[in-house]
Amino acid sequence: MAIKAVVLFSEGLDSSLAVKLMQEQGIDVIAVNFVTPFGVGNKDKKKNGTIIERAKELNVELKLYKVGDDYLQIVENPRYGYGKNLNPCIACRIWMFKKAKELMHETGAKFIVSGEVLGQRPMSQKRYTMEIIEKESGLEGFIVRPLTAKLLTSSIPEQKGWVKREKFFDILGRSRIRQFDLAKKFKITNYDNPAGGCLLTDSSFCLKIKDLINSDMFNIDNINLIKNGRYFNISNCFKLVVGRNEGENAGLLNLAGKGNLILEPVVKGPVAIGRGEINDKYIQIALEIVAYYCKGQENNFKIKFSIFPDTAKNAIVKGKMTEEVLSGYRIKSTKKVNTTLKERSGFL
């Protein structure tokens, strides 16, 4: 019976190469993908579809793991601190490896495989941080990194002869030239570009996340909402998201839930969703913000609004608020986002 291994599987090329290198050695691969709300430019449905197609092309069993509130706790309070913004890369990797370890035991797999490359990522892929991640996840010696293995201490699977170290590589740093060559060899064409990958490295998005955290409104539903438009901090207990185009308008309506304020202009304009503690004052502010983005006459903007699932009412907004008033509800930028987050981060 073939030895089984669990591979951390993502949209990038490196994890696909890790799968192929394991399959080349006769390892029975189980791929696991962690679906987080912080993927760049991907809605879950679209992302999962791409991941599923990629797994089929590689002929690998795929398990999708949708993260929950326990994952958000590491974003709020990462033991090993943040990167440049709110990216808790070390704590995130520890969390993922722990979940992969659980799957390893459930499936009878012998070890974990990762497409990581030494020196490729500034926070989580340094030698000492890799060692921390292995220790904290309870997987010391049981993580195989085939793309960079020859630069690391040999793993237990290598020592036991489950896999052959000589068939692995010594790739170092951010250059992807050798990975691209391997992709040609294995005829892998379906993978995302290496740039980016996590919204927690985006400073403007992190301003919204910081505000949700400091307002005790940080949850997966609200994270998904704020990815769909302009964000307004009406108060510490009420937030408004206004669509910027037809796609975002549709997305916002799909995300509307019980107790949400829904605003839809009768004239051409954006959809908006408000969440939190709703009162007449906040409804009026939301109406005026939506009217600001409506097109047509300068006065008497007709907007439908409701608190879902109640029947919609019509409101008339006369004139538009000024840019100065509007800007007062925007999130203000800071030089470094993670320095003002209630001192939640503990650094090495």
Image: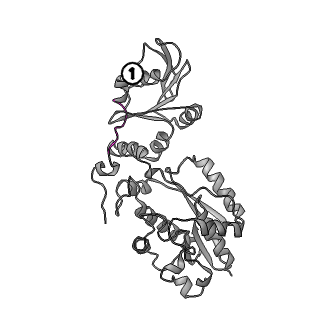
Residue 197's place in the image compared with 135, above or below, is above
Q: Amino acid at mark 1?
A: Gln
Instruction: Bin the neighbour count of mark 1 within 10 Å (Cα to Cα): few under 14, some 14-19, many 20 and up.
Output: few
**Magenta part of the protein: which range?**
328-334
Give the farthest residue toward the left: 343
Query: Mark 1 = which residue?
Result: 284
The residue positioned 36% from the left and 37% from the top of the image is 331
**Element carrying mark 1:** helix
Q: Position of residue 344 (x, y in %)?
A: 30, 54
User: Between residues 41 and 250, which one lies in front from this camera angle?
Assistant: 41
Whether residue 23 is visible to the viewer of this picture, yes or no, is: yes
Quarter of the figure with residue 277: top left
| Quadrant in which the C terminus is drawn | bottom left
Quarter of the figure with residue 113: bottom right
The residue positioned 56% from the left and 21% from the top of the image is 268
The residue positioned 66% from the left and 71% from the top of the image is 20
Give the farthest residue toward the bottom: 160
For the stretch drawn in magenta, the main secondary structure is loop
